[in-house]
Image: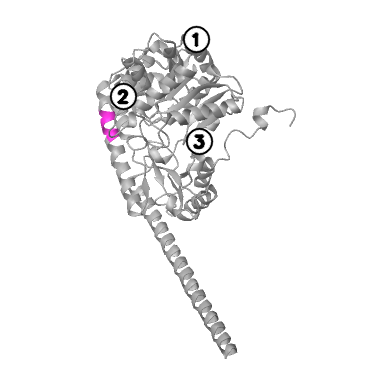
């Protein structure tokens, strides 16, 4: 083992998290409506499979882009040869325009400030390398995406300090929680380099309010640290309140000429909004030219292929397509989310009111045998192995309260979602029956003990009375 590196031998990847263990169990026994109808239904994967027909239809109508042609002539050789790591200018322009369109064109983005990466995972890690040293810390509000333990920490050596948020205010960030997290890092002798948030939130499925964003800007201004806003779900907002980008708040407050302008960075990806995680298209947007230059050099380790860039530059430049896609996709997300919420309600389960994302933050605290994370894990195992649904326990998201679960809805069909809710309702009903039987047994025992104690007391009284006589 002495010949291997620290990264190889350490156990900080996070692969042993219940978040990933659930995936492993699903892969051993995946549900299929025909081949394996008793298998595990995957509800732990935040993937958008509701709108594949839209890009497929576009591809069928745009044979040049799909066939790597320009004006009917093949450009395969041009795309196959080595490309500069700065990325294709046409794609970078199309991508920033798409980002602006999602934000209602309230803000614009400069293609010279964007760095292409192989997905948001690579973007977040690259920013850690750019902004922090090994042993420095970033503050993250809980609950947060379990993959951040891998993306931010594993290879960089950066530490995560949680900003503890609670259900009492719908898990919103507060000034006391921010300060407490900062002080906790100080007590651990960790230098805080920034705050990272996901907006819309993974796993909450909610957008951040403007006062929360203002609070974050004030906080990083006061502490002279960075802010990373992971906005990969920005195009999934399907109901009010709408999405507000951190860049919009900066511009509304006229902070372009202040030091904080260069300390705010955005992570984006086409994995969620366009449903293309396999294409591995991510991006960093920063107003700091030094960060942009360094991140661009680092992108050599995770480039987006020229073929992918060419295809998507044509697709995203088609404004008729992007407008239609965004409208239809958001309607489909809202419909599927409503079916999940309705199914949960029928099973006697509530969830946090959400307006974005590919999942709901589900409240199963009433199903716990005790208010502990041990009880949460017991419930999770029963749901995975007995109910055969893979969902993500709140503890894997570092939630401070046991009994919350992330349940995804956009990666399965309407029929599969209906079956999942039927399974869950049957389980909850059986738990209720068992609890009722257990309570009845306890009551009968209590009644028996009461009668027994009464008889003993009566016999004792009778004996004393006889003695006195």
In the image, what residue occupies the spot 49% across and 29% down?
140
Q: Return the disc, 2 or 1, that comes first in the chain's sequence.
A: 2
Instruction: Report crowding for label 1: few under 14, some 14 to 19, many 20 or more residues within 10 A (C-alpha).
Output: few
The x and y percentages for residue 398 are 51, 38
What residue is disc 1 on? 290
The answer to which of 322 and 381 lies nearer the viewer is 381
- In the image as oriented, which residue stretches furthest toward the bottom? 469
Asked whether, in this view, residue 103 is left or right of residue 135, the answer is left
Question: Is any part of residue 284 visible from this angle?
Answer: no
The answer to which of 320 and 238 lies nearer the viewer is 238
The residue stretch that appears in magenta: 324-330
Contact check, label 3 and label 2, Cβ < 8 Å: no
The disc at residue 146 is 3
Asked whether, in this view, residue 338 is left or right of residue 165, the answer is left
CA gap, disc 3 to disc 1? 30 Å
Q: Return the disc, 3 or 2, that comes first in the chain's sequence.
A: 2
Using the rendered view, name the quadrant where residue 461 is placed.
bottom right
- Which quadrant is home to the N terminus? top right
In the image, what residue occupies the spot 54% across and 32% down?
149
The x and y percentages for residue 278 are 44, 30
The disc at residue 102 is 2
State the predominant SS element of the stretch in magenta: helix
Using the rendered view, name the quadrant where residue 13 is placed.
top right
The answer to which of 216 and 321 lies nearer the viewer is 216
- Per the image, is 328 magenta? yes
CA gap, disc 2 to disc 1? 27 Å
Examine the rendered structure and indicate whether residue 467 appears above or below residue 277.
below
């Amino acid at each position: 083992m002495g010949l291997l590196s620290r990264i190889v031998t350490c156990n900080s990847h996070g692969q042993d998290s219940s978040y990933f263990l659930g995936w492993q169990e699903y892969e051993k026994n995946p549900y299929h409506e025909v081949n394996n109808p008793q298998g595990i239904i995957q509800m732990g994967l935040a993937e958008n499979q509701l709108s594949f027909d839209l890009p497929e239809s576009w591809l069928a109508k745009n044979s040049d882009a799909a066939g790597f042609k320009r004006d009917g002539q093949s450009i395969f050789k041009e795309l196959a040869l080595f490309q500069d790591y700065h990325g294709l200018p046409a794609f970078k322009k199309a991508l920033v325009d798409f980002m602006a369109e999602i934000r209602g064109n309230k803000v614009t983005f400069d293609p010279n400030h964007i760095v292409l990466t192989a997905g948001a995972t690579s973007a977040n890690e690259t920013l850690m390398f750019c902004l922090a040293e090994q042993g420095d810390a970033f503050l993250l509000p809980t609950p947060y995406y379990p993959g951040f333990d891998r993306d931010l920490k594993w290879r960089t050596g950066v530490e995560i300090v949680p900003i503890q948020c609670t259900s009492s205010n719908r898990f919103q960030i507060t000034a006391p929680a921010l300060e407490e997290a900062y002080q906790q890092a100080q007590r651990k002798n960790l230098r805080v380099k920034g705050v990272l948030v996901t907006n819309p939130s993974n796993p909450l499925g909610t957008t951040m309010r403007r006062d929360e964003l203002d609070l974050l800007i004030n906080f990083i201004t006061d502490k002279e640290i960075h802010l990373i806003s992971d906005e990969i779900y920005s195009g999934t907002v399907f109901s009010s309140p709408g999405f507000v980008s951190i860049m919009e708040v900066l511009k509304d407050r006229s902070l372009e000429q202040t030091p904080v302008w260069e300390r705010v960075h955005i992570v984006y990806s086409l994995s969620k909004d366009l449903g293309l995680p396999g294409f591995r298209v991510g991006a960093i947007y920063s107003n700091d030219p030094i960060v942009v230059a360094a991140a661009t050099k680092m992108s050599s380790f995770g480039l987006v292929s020229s073929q992918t860039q060419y295809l998507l530059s044509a697709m995203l430049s088609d404004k008729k397509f992007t407008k239609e896609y965004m409208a239809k996709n958001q309607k489909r997300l809202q419909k599927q989310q409503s079916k999940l919420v309705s199914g949960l309600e029928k099973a006697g389960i509530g969830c946090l009111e959400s307006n974005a994302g590919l999942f709901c933050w589900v409240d199963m605290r009433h199903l716990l045998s005790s208010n502990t994370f041990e009880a949460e894990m017991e419930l999770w195992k029963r749901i995975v192995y007995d109910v055969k649904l893979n969902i993500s326990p709140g503890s894997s998201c570092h939630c401070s309260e046991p009994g919350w679960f992330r349940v995804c809805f956009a990666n399965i069909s309407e029929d599969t979602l209906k079956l999942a809710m039927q399974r869950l309702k049957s389980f909850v009903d059986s738990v209720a029956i068992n609890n009722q039987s257990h309570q009845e047994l306890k009551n009968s025992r209590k009644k028996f003990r009461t009668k027994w104690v009464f008889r003993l007391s009566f016999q004792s009284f009778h004996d004393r009375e006889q003695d006195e006589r």
